[in-house]
Image (cartoon, rainbow, N blue to C red):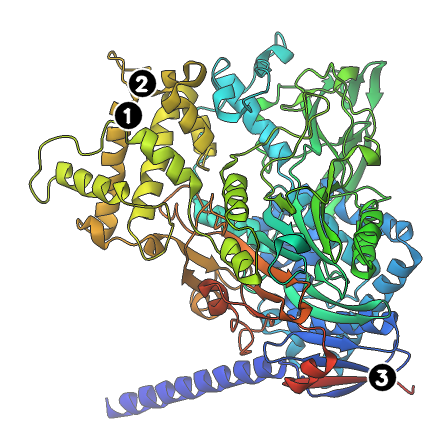
């Protein structure tokens, strides 16, 4: 017995020693992948010495003898700090995430392969301007130079993630950068998904679905089923059961995914509207919250002058920011740049499809998707003259696709001649708004609203390709349409000079929130997803509230968390509930309702993380919308996760008889809107009390509205989540200027999943007082102090300086990486 005890003791001690040694080994190799920012490196690919001066916040300021050398150093700096993120973005654009994640990434790879993002990027290299081609090549050389340093110095494979998710370290190519830009363009637009949703609503409620999705001035939507007479549409009984949090996390496998949608704010004030007599511009771009952030701050000293702002690892450009004479901001335009067309297959040969001239064979080719821990899958990529054939699952096509048909995608993106990166380079070098508007003519996808400011004033213009549609289009581009009908096909692109622009408006202010675009009746309109106009109205009110603005007033507007949607809806939905009924006993549902209504009656709509009112409001409106539509729409209701304030307002104002939604169809009585409002509030309070207790006043919005900045690869691994993910309570909501998008359903319905990954405020009266911030830190290495050092500043609404003064950068440097040309 004693001998057995001794051996067990020895084994236990041995296991402890091995575990400690294993941890130390992992720690050692992980630490080795941290770059030395004070290193001197000999590299091939530069013509003269280059300096990468890193400030306290790890923002690189890059100085070189030529633009080519500067882009080389940007590639090296990106790879130093974000190598794993760059490889994930490249894999996502190539359709190769399954090679490291396994089967859960197959659907994403399948969609990207069929969209042809990487094949288009390979053709786009030749379409760029000579200067941009040189920048692409130099950037790739810089990335590869860092890979060589990693291999030469045994630097822990360059990032600790590679120990769990091996990569082949394939050399960076110019097409890789363009493929990532194509991926971002595909992620910025959700028009195809919107078409599918409208079609499903039309099937479920042909008469009334327009209340949910149509603009006030739009004609009624056609009945989708009538587009395919005699054919039965396969409507499932229920939507597939999903874990919403898991589903969202899967979408972030490569940081972004096609069809996510995007939003942003940008506005500018002319010199005469500012206190210091120089133009002001603010820009914040909402992206999925990930660790590290999609954004990376950098300053480049080009021959045309310094430029500083937000970059995205993998792309050799400052995408938003300023130079000494110009500031620019970008917001997604939300134009209708995608159409789904339904192609009929030949019953005798499914490789042929119907055209106006008869049956025609599809183009087809095969590709292999390799899957980690599984057999590879061969897919057949098919294409008609209208576009590539789309898979069913990612766009939710099955309920709207008649048997014997396929859906193809028409899109302005992934075109061989896309010169958007050349446009970004033109913006960086522009010496004023005139130069910037010339550069903007090269933007193809995504279409964006470009906000400009210089010493002379401010401008706003729409940049990007816009499809030309036939006035006789059967659905006006709002829903999928038969592809064999000539009127449903695009008629090319609109003339570049047809896009709207505003130059030096009388008010001295230009504004964009990405929620709406001007336009007339179809086919002259630009889109159908007008969203809700609350944010743009809030911004206009904030701008009109002062005769002159300062940097601080712009920052205050950027961080504004007052919800105009709450201010608009609560007086309507609570009109018959405020201060009614006798005082109720403590602990009863009636007393809880009275306490909640009393709080809401005094609330100003501020979605502060420290208040209970935002949580009560959000839960009430979500439950109210669900109860209004669930009986009419059936399973489609599960797809309507976002709050639609304009719809609720129509219902409670009874616009065009919209109060009919308040009646529960299946019940004998005719319910009115006050009854539904009260029942919804009671249900919401019951749910909240089960989570947070019965004391309404003790609830906090921040307890539910948690921003989980997820590491796409390791944030899902038990035991590593707390190391790699960054979790914070946040203020704001879907309709505040400081937009903080929520998941919308499931147990974590109010989880904050999107936010301003980048904020910048540029003051051209004193350019070096301009400020910016990103949502995490500059480094993607979780053991770096720069992994999350900016996250708390971001949460508190604080910023860091944005100076183009070389001496100031050097004076505050925490490291200077010196690159010298290799003598070999």
Residue 797 location, x and y as percent?
48, 63
SS of the residue under disc 3: loop
Instruction: Place residue 335 in its image quadrant.
Output: top right
Q: Which marked residue is nearer to the observer: mark 3 or mark 2? A: 3
Most distant residue in the left direction: 585
SS of the residue under disc 1: helix
Near-viewer residue (386 or 626): 626
Contact check, label 1 and label 2, Cβ < 8 Å: yes
Most distant residue in the top direction: 230
Q: How crowded is mark 2: few (under 14 residues within 10 Å), some or many (20 or more)?
A: some
Q: Residues within 10 Å of mark 1 (few under 14, many from 20)?
A: many
- Mark 3–mark 1 Cα distance, whole angstroms, equals 71 Å
Near-viewer residue (739 or 717): 739
* Residue at mark 3: 49
Residue 290 location, x and y as percent?
54, 59
Residue 635 location, x and y as percent?
43, 26
Mark positioned earlier in the residue sequence (1 or 2): 2
Which residue: 25% across, 50% down? 691
The quadrant of the picture occupied by the C terminus is bottom right
Numbered mark located on residue 664 in the image: 2
Mark positioned earlier in the residue sequence (3 or 1): 3
Numbered mark located on residue 676 in the image: 1
Is there any visible trace of residue 203 in the rendered image? Answer: yes
Q: Which marked residue is nearer to the observer: mark 1 or mark 2? A: 1
Is there any visible trace of residue 376 in the rendered image? Answer: no
- Mark 3–mark 2 Cα distance, whole angstroms, equals 74 Å
Which residue: 70% across, 84% down? 810
Residue 680 location, x and y as percent?
28, 32
Instruction: Place residue 775 in its image quadrant.
Output: bottom right
Q: Height in image: 30 above or below 480?
A: below
């Amino acid at each position: 017995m004693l001998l057995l005890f001794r051996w067990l003791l020895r084994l236990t001690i041995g296991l402890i020693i091995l575990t400690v040694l294993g941890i130390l080994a992992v720690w050692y190799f992980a630490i080795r992948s941290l770059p030395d920012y004070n290193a001197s490196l000999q590299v091939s690919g530069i013509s003269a010495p280059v300096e990468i001066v890193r400030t306290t916040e790890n923002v690189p300021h890059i100085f070189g003898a030529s633009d080519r050398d500067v882009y080389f150093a940007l590639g090296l700096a990106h790879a130093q700090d974000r190598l794993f993120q760059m490889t994930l973005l490249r894999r996502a654009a190539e359709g190769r995430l399954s090679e490291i994640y396994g089967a859960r990434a197959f659907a994403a790879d399948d969609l990207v392969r069929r969209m042809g993002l990487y094949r288009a990027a390979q053709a786009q290299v030749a379409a760029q301007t000579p200067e941009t081609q040189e920048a692409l090549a130099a950037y790739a050389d810089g990335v590869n130079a860092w890979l060589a340093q990693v291999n030469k110095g045994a630097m822990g494979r360059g990032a600790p993630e590679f120990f769990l998710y091996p990569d082949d370290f394939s050399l960076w190519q110019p097409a890789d950068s363009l493929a990532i830009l194509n991926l971002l363009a595909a992620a910025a637009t959700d028009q195809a998904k919107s078409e599918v949703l409208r079609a499903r609503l039309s099937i479920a409620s042909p008469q009334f679905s327009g209340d949910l999705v149509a603009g006030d001035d739009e004609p009624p939507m056609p009945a989708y089923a009538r587009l395919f007479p005699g054919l039965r549409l396969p409507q499932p009984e229920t939507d597939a059961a999903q874990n919403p949090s898991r589903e969202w996390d899967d979408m972030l496998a490569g940081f972004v995914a096609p069809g996510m949608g995007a939003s942003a704010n940008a506005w500018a004030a002319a010199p005469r509207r500012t206190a210091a007599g120089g133009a002001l511009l603010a820009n914040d771009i909402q992206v999925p919250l990930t660790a590290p952030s999609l954004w990376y701050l950098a300053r480049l000293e080009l021959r045309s002058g310094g430029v500083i702002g937000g970059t995205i690892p993998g792309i050799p450009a400052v995408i938003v920011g300023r130079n000494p004479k110009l500031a620019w901001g970008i917001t997604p335009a939300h134009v209708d740049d995608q159409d789904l067309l339904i192609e009929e297959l030949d019953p005798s040969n499914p490789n042929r499809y119907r055209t106006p001239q008869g049956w025609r064979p599809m183009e087809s080719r095969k590709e292999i998707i390799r899957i980690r821990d599984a057999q590879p899958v061969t897919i057949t990529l098919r294409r008609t003259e209208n576009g590539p054939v789309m898979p069913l699952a990612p766009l939710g096509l099955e309920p709207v696709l008649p048997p014997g048909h396929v859906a193809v995608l028409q899109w302005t993106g992934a075109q061989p001649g896309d010169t958007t990166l050349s446009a970004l380079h033109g913006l960086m070098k522009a010496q004023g708004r005139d130069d910037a508007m010339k550069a903007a003519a090269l933007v193809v996808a995504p279409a964006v609203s470009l906000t400009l400011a210089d010493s002379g004033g401010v401008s706003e213009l729409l940049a990007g390709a816009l499809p030309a549609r036939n006035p006789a289009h059967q659905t006006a581009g709002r829903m999928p349409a038969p592809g064999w009908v000539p009127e449903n096909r695009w008629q090319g692109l609109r003339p570049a000079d047809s896009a709207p622009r505003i130059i030096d408006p009388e008010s001295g202010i230009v504004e964009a929130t990405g929620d709406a675009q001007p336009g007339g009746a179809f086919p002259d309109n630009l889109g159908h997803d007008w969203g809700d106009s609350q944010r743009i109205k809030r911004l206009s009110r904030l701008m009109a509230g002062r005769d002159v603005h300062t940097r601080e007033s712009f920052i205050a507007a950027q961080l504004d968390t007052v919800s105009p949607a709450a201010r608009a809806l609560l007086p309507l939905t609570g009109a018959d509930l405020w201060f009614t009924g006798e005082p109720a006993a403590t602990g009863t549902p009636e007393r809880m309702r009275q306490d909640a209504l009393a709080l809401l009656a005094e609330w100003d709509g501020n979605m502060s993380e420290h208040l209970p009112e935002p949580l009560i409001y959000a839960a009430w409106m979500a439950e109210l919308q669900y109860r209004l539509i669930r009986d009419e729409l059936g399973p489609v209701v599960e797809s309507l996760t976002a709050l639609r304030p304009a719809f609720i307002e129509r219902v409670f104002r009874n616009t065009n008889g919209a109060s009919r939604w308040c009646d529960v169809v299946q019940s004998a009585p005719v319910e009115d809107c006050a009854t539904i409002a009260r029942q919804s509030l009671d249900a919401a309070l019951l749910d909240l009390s089960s989570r947070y207790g019965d004391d309404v006043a003790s609830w906090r919005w921040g307890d539910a509205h948690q921003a989980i900045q997820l590491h796409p690869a390791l944030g899902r691994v038990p035991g590593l989540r707390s190391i790699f993910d960054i979790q914070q309570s946040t203020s704001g909501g879907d309709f505040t200027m400081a937009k903080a998008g929520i998941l919308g359903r499931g147990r974590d319905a109010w989880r904050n999943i999107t936010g301003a990954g980048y904020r910048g405020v540029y003051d051209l009266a004193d350019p070096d007082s301009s400020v910016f911030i990103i949502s995490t830190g500059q480094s993607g290495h979780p053991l770096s102090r720069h992994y999350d050092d900016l996250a708390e500043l971001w949460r508190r609404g604080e910023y860091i300086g944005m100076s183009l003064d070389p001496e100031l950068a050097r004076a505050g440097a925490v490291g200077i990486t010196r690159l010298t040309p290799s003598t070999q």
